[in-house]
Every structure is written in structure tokens, then in C-alpha cells.
Amino acid sequence: MVIVGAGFGGLTAARALKKVDVRITVIDRSNHHLFQPLLYQVATAALNPSDIAAPIRRILRGQKNVEVILAEVVSIDTSRRMVVLADGLVPYDFLILATGATHSYFGHDEWEPFAPGLKSIQDALDIRRRVLTAFEVAEREPDPEVRRAWMTFVIVGAGPTGTELAGTLVEVARHTLSRDFRHIDPAEASVILLEGTDKVLSAYVDELSTKAKEQLERLGVEVRTGKIVTEIDADGVTAGTERIAAKTILWAAGVAASPLARSLCVPLDRAGRVMVEPDLSIPGHPEIAVIGDLAHVESEGKLVPGVAPAAMQMGAAAAENLRTMLGSRPRSVFHYRDKGMLATIGRGAAVAQLGKWKASGYIAWLLWLFVHIFFLIGFRNRLLVMIQWAWSYVTYDRGARLITGRVKGPLVHGLTSELLPPSDAPPSQPMVTTRYDP
Amino acid sequence: MVIVGAGFGGLTAARALKKVDVRITVIDRSNHHLFQPLLYQVATAALNPSDIAAPIRRILRGQKNVEVILAEVVSIDTSRRMVVLADGLVPYDFLILATGATHSYFGHDEWEPFAPGLKSIQDALDIRRRVLTAFEVAEREPDPEVRRAWMTFVIVGAGPTGTELAGTLVEVARHTLSRDFRHIDPAEASVILLEGTDKVLSAYVDELSTKAKEQLERLGVEVRTGKIVTEIDADGVTAGTERIAAKTILWAAGVAASPLARSLCVPLDRAGRVMVEPDLSIPGHPEIAVIGDLAHVESEGKLVPGVAPAAMQMGAAAAENLRTMLGSRPRSVFHYRDKGMLATIGRGAAVAQLGKWKASGYIAWLLWLFVHIFFLIGFRNRLLVMIQWAWSYVTYDRGARLITGRVKGPLVHGLTSELLPPSDAPPSQPMVTTRYDP
């Protein structure tokens, strides 16, 4: 059998089949499993990529019935039962499809270069580079209006990712960078969180949404709800009639299921997710299960949310169904067990909703911390993350403040390249300052 | 005054001027200072980039007379006393130039895409991706001859960097990856170290060179001395009459000084280094000091080596000369104090030469370990590096085994893209294996 995607869903399925007499091929286009809930910490320079990612081979190396392939899957040929790779083919008898979701610009893909989303390690490093570079450029910018635009950070979408990014960016600006610049005060940076609906963290009950908004504002985030973004370009965002001049815009709004779903030729929902049967298979193909963020599943009349625990439960259920099929027993219907929701907002700020139990503030934040460290795959990462968090918490310092990646010539797109000054410029000055030609 | 380059030399100079009443502008094209002696550990997945790099701003933030600028320096206009940036100008009254060196392909720049060198974080991540990807491709390659080429790693140049890379790559192959693959045995990988001269680590006395070669061979490296490379392409290396089929070639041979040296219009040596005066200034320009790997300096009749301690001593000397100039006292001649040389080869293997005292093997390795941890800038990094090293030492595991960077379509350049198989291919197979069309 083949599992495509080694996220929370795919890995759980592979591990659940450890003792079953079946040969498993796990295919992923990256060599690592990513602990996505902490990706924003890489984007905001608190953690290193390898703290939240582990090689898939290492995770599965003890499991003898598994083979791992690093490859890009192009489509699924359901009639011939083939996984089509960019550079080969893998036949399957059973298939678990767990390729997840990416961000969606609601038909405005032209916004992507100006407002990157956060789904992969590479995305996180891109965002980190943009944020850190913005302060570097602001430091050198003489025009106050342009400088303000470099020090304005707009986050579109107040779901869990947007909320985390906004809360953390304020902390970076107000504390981490506070004493590092000479011409700007990073604490004056504006972090603006735009949300189309009328509340932040809309999956939570109203009481917690309000609490979350209050906590964000206390940290220093400007929260603006009911703002539908209509335009994004290199210089800012337009939301309705309002124009915000900002050089750094981050996208945390829409999600779209992996385009692989389309090759299955079965009904999809509006976000591109596969409308699966109650047992997670697809119509007419009991040998295929679709799980995780790629699956549209209802449980007790409600859509199962796109969160890690749901993906893991589906992975386990799909594996169980495969086992019963091998033993010719009837397959079971998937039931989602809601273990609650947690969202962090910033230092000491979070909201938690576990059934009827609700919490916000410091308690919720400690719970969040505990859950996230506990579930980080691999002891080594867990220890390192704990040390780094403890260190940042005490010192407000962030170790991974590196601008990396190949950037040639002027360091930022949009910085004007300048000519030499007229040759009557003073040959030397006792006070050295950076000068720019108009 | 202006300091260009925040490596060991530039940073030392800036710090030495802490109490002097002078305004200092430090310009660097990256935002971090790099602990280059450990860069090979990032390339071989043992350490994270931020473990060996620290933001220049953070290092200098307590020093009120320093301003840091992130910018690419294009040239020095010595007549008008201007540092010309890609996007601006910075005038200077005093200038310390410390932009270091990069790798040189001896006029064969066309080799660079096939044999990357190791000078920046980005280089290290590129090499890491190439090495890890090579094993991934080998795992999927059915042709034994091609598979062998993917599992052959050639390192050109047996200086400190080449030696470290070779020793560490063998460890990665034999231990770290040992149980992760199903179709290949990574321990069968060949690591070949090619050297043009007749010994490895030629800066060391013969006795230690021989010891280093023995240690490399005991670890499993094939050392081939007296081999001048005449051709490098995507499929291998030619050294004299010998052709080695290898898909991964790393360049650790030549160094060339930063091209900025040319804009000074003063004599350079063959490697492009500036022939400085005994006080580190350049002919006719007492206001300019050139230090570190960019400077060709002789001390007691011998060329000062391009190592971190030498750069730091020059930085201190240049700062001292500036101070004496401000006080109108005479400038002093630079003397290099050789504190000895250390090179690591692999787990428990190193050589050390401190004046007349020589050591090799475990003792030298412990000394190397101590010195490198001690000099890592910033306590936080030091602690994390120690934990990670201790962990890798005990478990042979390497945490940073991530293949990152944008790679689209087929994951490796040179992998053939394939067509669908004929439609009479079996629709399903009980045993799933990866298949390839010829």
C-alpha cells in the first residue's frame, strides 16, 4: 500500500500499521515531517527549522514494513491504481492520501509575491527574512513616510496562524530588537491584524474571541475586524475604503486543499477538499482513503476541523479500516473526538476551549506550552525547544535572527538603486552618517 | 570611521574602539557574524545555522558609538573617501577593510555549479541539501553504476575545510543514516579526498600531516594526494588520467580575496590579497587599514595565515593604530603571534600544533572541541551547541537533516523525467515497489 504525505495524518496511519503484514511506501516531497503548529516560531526567529522538523526516514526507520520515497506526486491514476510521480510511477493496492492543504488567495494569486503565506519551512524562512529586512531598510530610510511603511506589518486573517504571528511580531519589535537600531525605534512598529469576519479566532465561542482580541490589543496589535481585503501590492493593502501603506504583508487567510484532490475525479467542496464517505474512502473506490486537511468529513453533523488531532484520528481510522478489510470485516464510520482547541496569542496570552471548559490568559498559555512541547516529535527536539523557549522568555532574545537566502545587489526589492553624488560632494566628513541621494 | 565586514577581524576592531571617541559605521552584506570554523557542521547537518551565527546588531548593541548597516559594498572610492554601496554612499575619514576571502576555482568558474564551496550559511545549506538528496536519489536508482555515482562523494582540497568535510561525511554515511534506507546501504558510500600537493593539511609539520592522513583513512576516507583536478562536470571529476564518477563534488581548494581589493588600486598578491604596509595601511593611504583574509601581511618573514586568530590580532592592531593616529603618536608594525593550529578530522580525530608541541588523535580532538566551544560567540549558542554535540556523539544522530530550499519538479537536476508506462501495465500489484521506465 501507499501513503502519500507524511504529515500528522500520513505518519499516524503508517505507524498504526506497524504490526500488520503489509508493505507500505510513504511518499513525500520533502524529507521531513513538520510540526506545523510551531512554524510561526521559525518565521519569527525564535526556533530553528530543525527544532520543529524531523527526517521522515528517522521517524520510521525502526518500522521494517515501511519504505520512504522522496518524490513529488503529480496525480493519482485511480483506474490503473498508480501514483504518478514527477519522475516515475508507484502502483498501489491500497492508497491513503494525506497531502493536506496550502494557502489560498481566493482567486487573487497575484497577491502571493507581496503577501506570502506560511505552510513550509521555506515559507517561514522567507517571512523571517522579510520581517528582519524591513527593520534594516527602515533604519537606513531617510523619508519618514516611507520609513513608516517599512515599519508597518499587516497580517491578513485572524485565525490561529494570523493571531500567533501578530502577537509574536509585536514582541519581536518591542523587546527583541529594542536596543539594536540607532535611527529607528522598533517599538514604534505597527502590527495590524485584518480580519474579514467580525471576530478573531472565529472557531471559538464569542467569549473567548473577545478575550483573544483584548489580549492582542494589550500586547500592542491593532485588530481590525470586518475588513475584506480588496487589493494587495508592493506598497500596501486596501481593505474596503481604507488604504494601509505597508511594506510587509503576511497572508494567513484562506486555505485550499492540495490540488492532487482534483485528479481523483470525485466531488470536492469549495475549498477543494474531497467529499469522503463516512468511512473516509471515496465514492466507488474502497481502496482509497483521504484523510487530514485534504478530507471534507462530517462527524455528528459538524465539519471536522483542519487540525492536527483530527488528522491523526483519521490516520488511525484509515489504518484500522484497512486492517478490517484485510480480514474481510465491515469497515467503520469515522467519528471525530473533539479534544478541544488551543490558540496562543503571545507571551502569557492564549485561549483554550475544551468542551464546556474555557480559559484564557496565562493558564491557557501554560496549557498551550505544555501540549506543544509534549507533542513535538523526538526527545532531542523537545529538550532544545524547551531550552530555547526558556531562554527567550527570560531574555526576550531570539536566537535565530538570521537573514539567509540568496539576495543579490540591493537587499530588498523596491529599494532604489542610486547614482554617485555630484563630484563636489565633500571628500570626507568628521561625522560619518549614511547618506542618500534623492 | 567605517568598518566593512563583520567577520572576526572587523568585529574585533569595532569592539577594540569601544571607549574611543569616534563614530563607527559597520557595514556587512549579511546581518549575522558567522563562526566560520564550524560551518562544515552545518553543511553536514550536525548544527543549525543559528548555532554558529549571531546577529551583528545584537553583538554590538551595547556599544553606543557603533551603527550597523546591512548593505552590499560595491567598491571603495579612495580619492573621495567614499564606500560605494549597491544602493548609496557612505563617506569615511578612516576605513578598515575586512571583507575576507571566498573560494577560487583557479580560473575554472564553470566548475562552480558542480562543485560548490563552503563560505556562507547558504553554501552550507546547499551542500547539506546535495548530500542528503544524493542518498535519496541513490535509494530510488535501479542502475547499479548510476547508484554508485550518487553514493560517491569527492572533496577537492585537503586543507582544514576539506579534511573536516571528508571525515564528517563518512560518519554521516556510516552511522547517522545507517538504518534509514531499504535499497541502499549508506555505509557503502565512498568519500574521496583529492589533494593536488603530496600531503594533507600542508600547513602542518610532516609528522602531523601523516597522522592526519592515517586518521582519515581509519575513519574510511580514501585520501588521494598528488592529484590535480583537470575537469569537473555533472557526472564526476577528472584528476590527471583518472576519472571518478561522482554526483556530489565539494570544493575546498582555492581561496581568493574579496574582489573589493581591486578597487583600492594598490598591488595585490596572486590570490588577490592586498599587499599591505607593515602597519596594515595601504601605500599612500594611512587612513585605510586592510585586515584579515583580505590582507597579505608578513610577520617575521612568514606570510600570516588566513585564520581567525590572525584576523582578530589584525583587527586589534588596526584599532590601536587608529587610536595612536588620533593622539598623533607613531603607528606600530603588526606582529603576528602564532598561537598554534588545530584541525579536526572526525569523531575523536584531530591534529594540533602549538609551537613545538604536537598532538594528534583524541587529545587533539578534545582540545579542538574545547577551543571551539569556548570561542563561539554568545553564551546561548555555546550551551545549545554543547548539548547538540553531546547528543550526536552518544547517538550518532544529526538533528538538522533537513532538505530545504525551493526545488520544483524532479527533485534533482539530472534525474530523468519519465513517461507513463504502456497501458497494459498491471493495474495493481500485491507487493508495492517503486518502478521506473527505462
Image: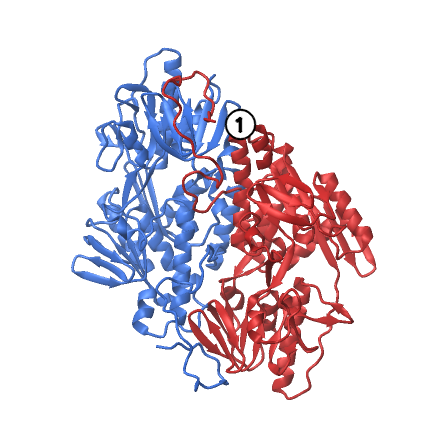
Chain colours: A red, B blue
Query: At label 1, which amino acid type do we have?
Result: Pro
In percent of the image, x 58 and y 42: which residue is there?
Answer: A248
Q: Where's residue A319, x and y in %? A: 62, 76
In percent of the image, x 43 and y 51: which residue is there?
Answer: B125
Between residues B104 and B415, which one lies in front from this camera angle?
A: B415
Q: Where's residue B43, x and y in %? A: 41, 52
Q: Is residue A156 above or below residue A287?
A: above
Q: Is residue A253 above or below residue A8?
A: above
Which of the 4 quarters of the picture holds residue A371?
Answer: bottom right
**Would you name the residue on which mark 1 appears?**
A142
In percent of the image, x 40 and y 70: which residue is there?
Answer: B139
The furthest residue to the left? B241
Q: Is residue B45 above or below residue B53?
A: below
Q: How many neighbours does mark 1 have within 10 angstroms: few (below 14), some (14-19), or many (20 or more)?
A: some
Q: Where's residue A16, x and y in %? A: 61, 74
Q: Left or right: where does residue B400 sit relative to residue B231?
A: right
Between residues B272 and A14, which one lies in front from this camera angle?
A: B272
Residue A399 visible to an observer of this rendering: no
Q: Left or right: where does residue A282 sit relative to residue B13?
A: right
User: Callout 1: residue from which chain?
Assistant: A
Exactly how many numbered labels are in the figure? 1
Q: Where's residue A315, x and y in %? A: 63, 71
Helix, strand or loop for disc 1: loop
The furthest residue to the front? A241
Residue B291 visible to an observer of this rendering: yes
The furthest residue to the top? B328
Q: Is residue A118 above or below residue A316?
A: above
